[in-house]
Amino acid sequence: MPPVAVHFNGGVNLPDAETVLRTLVERVPHGVRRLPDGEPGERAGWIGYQVPRLLATPGLEQVAAGTGDDPYDNSAVRLPAGTDAERIEWPDLGYAAEYARSYATFRRLRDEGVLPAGVRFQVEYPTPVAVGALVHPDGRDRFVRSYGRALTADLDRLLSEIPHSDVAVQWDAAVETVLVDQQPDTLTELAGRLAALLAHVPDDVPAGLHLCYGDAGHVHMMEPESLAPQVSLANGVMRPGPPGRRDSPAQPPGLVAPERSPRATPAWVSFTVPQYRDDEKFFAPLADLRTGPATELYLALVPYHPDRQADGTTDRQVALVDRFLPAGRAWGICTECGMARAERADVPRLLDLHREILDRHQPAR
């Protein structure tokens, strides 16, 4: 079936949350189930938002910045060998406070009728593994375990302050996606970590995954040869549990509150599709996807640079998705990452492309 929904992966290069929310519903009036605040201000730099906080954390040492030649050379701090990661006193990571302020704007606009009823406020968190990219490899594993507890505590604080019926949580898994592509033997461990993060979110709050290859300077960390690594990662969070119970994902210690039962499936998964790929090889792995109909699927068919895309590419991509997904499987569209690094003047056109792609393939709407 053709695409029927739209997903926003987070960042939108507009001045503030109110402008983002108003613009999203104005430009894309149908097919939207969740709305982000656009990650304005410092959060536009994704994990870069955490650098000042890491530098202010006692027990972490600053290291020399990268050369600048590699946009993904992100090491900023080191966890020294003599530092007990379990005793680190983490500062306020900032996400809960930022999202609580944006939620107040979301609620006001909804009460005014600007936002449609039933649409949830979407918050995005980087995974601990992703933030670990800011840490020197020496001690990175210890950092990820300790920081992961601080990050989930920040999320817990947010979810204690806003109604669960209004919110949805996305885990941004760019680093995991690339690692699984480069080192397939990491799949089991990384899928287990993602499953644990999904399971940490209470069952009455939808939680999804954003699988991504990065967008620093509109450059991927690596170019994917096909959707196979992303499909493997999405499949990997689905773990069969004991008879009579829901699927039980692998749970590395310290990442899941023991009183919470693991959810069976992500509420959604968004997949990266480079705008130049419209070939069978890239899309064929969708036939192996094992996420059931409870998981919304979004493919990045909205190009960041439509003027550089060959005519008819999107239509060919739509046909290939339809060909390899099971017959009748609903799915939707998105951009590869958010739109935080798009030029501000280009954002309205990108949003209009979401609507135009849906309308072109749903003529009876």
Image: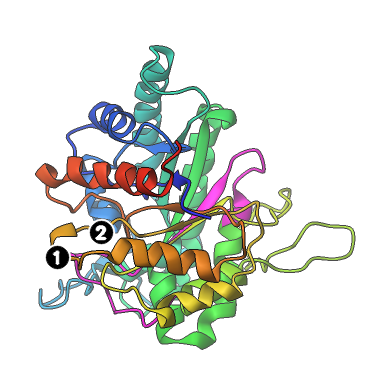
Of 290 and 259, nearer the camera is 290
Residue 244 at x, y percent in the picture: 89, 58
The image quadrant that residue 289 belongs to is: bottom right
Q: How many numbered marks does the figure carry?
A: 2
Above or below, comparing residue 30 to residue 169 in the picture = above
Residue 199 shows up from this direction: yes
Magenta range is: 198-227
Q: Nearer the viewer, residue 344 or 282?
A: 282
Indicate left or right for 207 with 40 as reference. right
Give the residue at x 31% y 30%: 21
188 vs 322: above or below: below
Up/down of 90 relative to 355, above or below: below
Residue 95 falls in image quadrant: top left
Can you tell which mark lies on residue 18? Answer: none
Q: Given contact means CB atoms under 8 Å apart, are the residues at marks 2 and 1 in contact?
A: yes
Q: Amino acid at mark 1?
A: Arg
In the image, taking residue 229 as reference, residue 340 lies left or right, namely left
In this figure, which residue is indicated by the disc labeled 1? 308
Q: Position of residue 234 (x, y in %)?
A: 55, 67
Quadrant in which the C terminus appears: top left
Asked if residue 172 is among those painted magenta in the image, a careful observer would answer: no
Residue located at (34% from left, 22% from top): 105
Q: Is residue 108 left or right of residue 254?
A: left
Q: Secondary structure at mark 2?
A: loop
The residue beneath circle 2 is 303
